[in-house]
Amino acid sequence: MTRDQHRGQIVLLAAIALAVVLVPIVLAYLQLGYHADTEPTTGTAPETAVERALDRAVHNAASGIADIYEWDRRDEAIRTVQNRLDPPIQGLERSRLADGIVYRISYNQSRASQWVRANCDSGPDRQFGPCETSRGVVVQDRGDQTHVLAIALDITVSTPDGERRLTTVRYLA
């Protein structure tokens, strides 16, 4: 066998090896490829995105409150939580303007009161002190310290497709 024939066989073997390697890749592409009947996703739904961001913001705003405020200073504790939440809420309300999405976020006192009735124990056998709600923030007396339990919020999401409203209670304790 001549040198050129030997080289030709090596090239042929390399081509066969490459074809064998490409077969699974082509099959995978065909299985995961484009389907005309599906819509492309453009990211997280605006409602989901704002709720996730609010979870983090609420947690951060309520963090350490029990270490600072005794129960008789609970109104001050609630003001502190709301003051801590104001910048993240304002940031969220402006965060998606370029995408045509507007968030409006406000506290919901009546939903916070409903949450207290459904979730805070009452009567003489309860483990902790009473729960109170003010301006959408739920607090509880635990060992004469003010613990933030939940914050009720109304969220309005305006997009080019319309407006959606939801009420959420971000639970902490």
Image (cartoon, rainbow, N blue to C red):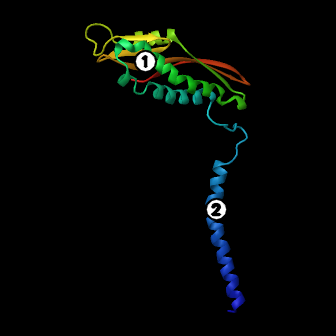
Q: Secondary structure at mark 1?
A: helix
Q: Could you tell me the amino acid type at mark 2? A: Val
Q: Are marks 2 and 1 in contact (CB under 8 Å)?
A: no
- Do we see residue 169 in this rendering? no
Quadrant hosting residue 117:
top left
Front-most of residues 45 and 90 = 90
Q: Could you tell me the amino acid type at mark 1? A: Ala
Q: Secondary structure at mark 2?
A: helix
Q: Quadrant of the C terminus?
A: top left
Residue topped by disc 2: 23
Q: Residues within 10 Å of mark 1 (few under 14, many from 20)?
A: many
Residue at the (57%, 26%) spot, across then down: 87
Image coords of residue 123 (percent x, y): 29, 7
The label number, if any, that marks residue 99 in the structure image = none
Q: Is residue 88 above or below residue 12?
A: above
Q: Number of numbered discs present?
A: 2
- Do we see residue 21 in this rendering? yes
Image coords of residue 76 (percent x, y): 43, 15
Quadrant hosting residue 129:
top left
Query: In the rendered view, does 170 fall on the left or right side of 161?
Result: left
Q: Earlier in the sequence, mark 2 or mark 1?
A: 2
Residue at the (29%, 18%) spot, across then down: 143
Q: Is residue 129 above or below residue 38?
A: above
Image coords of residue 130 (percent x, y): 34, 10
Residue at the (47%, 12%) spot, across then down: 112
Q: Quadrant of the N terminus?
A: bottom right
Quadrant hosting residue 153:
top right
Image coords of residue 5 (percent x, y): 70, 87
Query: In the rendered view, does 13 fall on the left or right side of 107?
Result: right
The label number, if any, that marks residue 77 in the structure image = 1
Q: Residues within 10 Å of mark 2 (few under 14, many from 20)?
A: few
